[in-house]
Image (cartoon, rainbow, N blue to C red):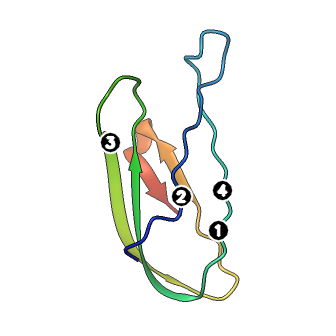
Amino acid sequence: DGRQVLRQVAQPSGLARDGRATLYHRLVTTAGRHEIVVRLRDQAGDEGFNHRAATPVELRPSQVLVIDFDRSRGGIIFR
């Protein structure tokens, strides 16, 4: 909706720090229409974001929206 609500760095897992990174954040918001924009960089040393997705959503009261990332399924996923 035009404002940043989360900026986070998730460190990769594993001894060599080359495994998957996990980030969990719970955000409580109002029901109704929202514009969700997600930007992600998944490679060290890159400038800017190499994955972007935006979608309008109509949230019902108590609805849960999960935002996931899976490169094999096209990147950022809203479900």
Which corner quadrant of the image does residue 17 belong to?
Answer: top right
Asked if the residue under mark 2 is in contact with the one under mark 3, i.e. CB atoms within 8 Å, the reply is no
Q: Which residue is mark 1?
A: 27
Q: Earlier in the sequence, mark 4 or mark 3?
A: 4
Which residue type carries mark 2? Leu
**Numbered tag placed on residue 49 in the rendering:** 3
| Mark 1 burial class by Cα count in 10 Å: few <14, some 14-19, many 20+ | few
Asked if the residue under mark 2 is in contact with the one under mark 1, i.e. CB atoms within 8 Å, the reply is yes
Q: Earlier in the sequence, mark 3 or mark 2?
A: 2
Measure the C-alpha gap from mark 1 to mark 2.
9 Å
33 is higher (above) or lower (below) than 72: below
Which residue type carries mark 4? His
Q: Which residue is mark 2?
A: 6
| Mark 4 burial class by Cα count in 10 Å: few <14, some 14-19, many 20+ | few
Measure the C-alpha gap from mark 1 to mark 4.
6 Å
- Which residue is at a point 67% across and 10% down the rendered structure image? 15
Asked if the residue under mark 4 is in contact with the one under mark 1, i.e. CB atoms within 8 Å, the reply is yes
